[in-house]
Image (cartoon, helix red, strand yellow):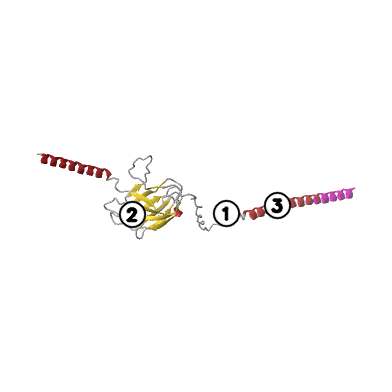
Amino acid sequence: MNRSHTRLRLSRTALTAVCAVVVVGVAAGPAAAHAGVTASDPRALAENVTLSFTSEAESDTAGIAELRVVLPKGIAPDAVALKDAPKEWKLSATPDGYAIGGPALATGTDAEYSITVRQLPDEKSLAFKTLETYSDGKISRWIEVPTDGEKVDNPAPVLELKAAAPGAKPLAPSPSPSPTSSSAPPPEQSAAPSGPVASTSAQATSAEEAGSSTGATVGVIAAVVVLLTAGFWWARRSRGRA
């Protein structure tokens, strides 16, 4: 009787434990896949830091083909270099971060890669919002940033930073790339002709005004000559008649 009672209690305990495991597994199912980031030196203002990313596969029918990452404030796209990635994957800068991708990975294979950052910003944490694109066109968005300890369904990879090392200072920004060449002349050159052109126009105007003035003067002189000649002949005829 005691043995039966003990077996019954053990069976109930085992059943309860199994149910608890199942419940936990079901509850954690939707959030099982995630994207994460770690750093070789997770300190503010640390230089030449390697950031390693992992994007877990969550599709049963397609593989990850591309990742697009929005860099946090303080990290410019040109301050990032690819260190390690799946075979034939390439990294290219975007206006707000970078894209990395290539041939689709095998179904169920996590996308793992690492980049080198020139310097981490002076912040307490950095969020790397990530879009995962699968070979079938499906997109998983790990872009939510939890605040005040709240839980979110699609959390972005967040890197917690320690305080900066004593004496650490922000590096000078990298030089801007030279402007793209163009067939159009530089502003200085295009504006330069305006001086001579304006000068020439002024000279032409002055010449026209001078010509007009000279013509008027000649006209007046001619009129005076005509009047004098007419007066001379009128006076002569008047004397002849007298």
Name the residue furthest bottom: 88
Q: Quadrant of residue 190?
A: bottom right
Q: Which mark is residue 187?
A: 1
Q: Which residue is mark 2?
A: 111
Instruction: Identify the mark nearer the N-term, 2 or 1.
Output: 2
Label 1 amino acid? Answer: Pro
Number of numbered discs visible in the structure rendering: 3
Q: Which residues are magenta?
A: 225-242
Q: Report whether 11 appears left or right of 128.
A: left
| Nearer to me, 18 or 13 | 13
Q: Which residue is mark 3?
A: 206
Secondary element at image label 2: strand
The reply to whether dot 2 and dot 1 touch (C-beta < 8 Å) is no
- Mark 2 crowdedness (10 Å alpha carbons): few <14, some 14-19, many ≥20: many
Q: Is residue 149 above or below residue 190?
A: above
Secondary element at image label 3: helix
Instruction: Identify the mark nearer the N-term, 1 or 3.
Output: 1
Q: Is residue 239 magenta?
A: yes
- Image location (x, y in percent) of residue 162: 42, 47
Residue drawn 85% across the image and 50% down it: 232
Q: Main secondary structure of the magenta part?
A: helix
Label 3 amino acid? Answer: Ser
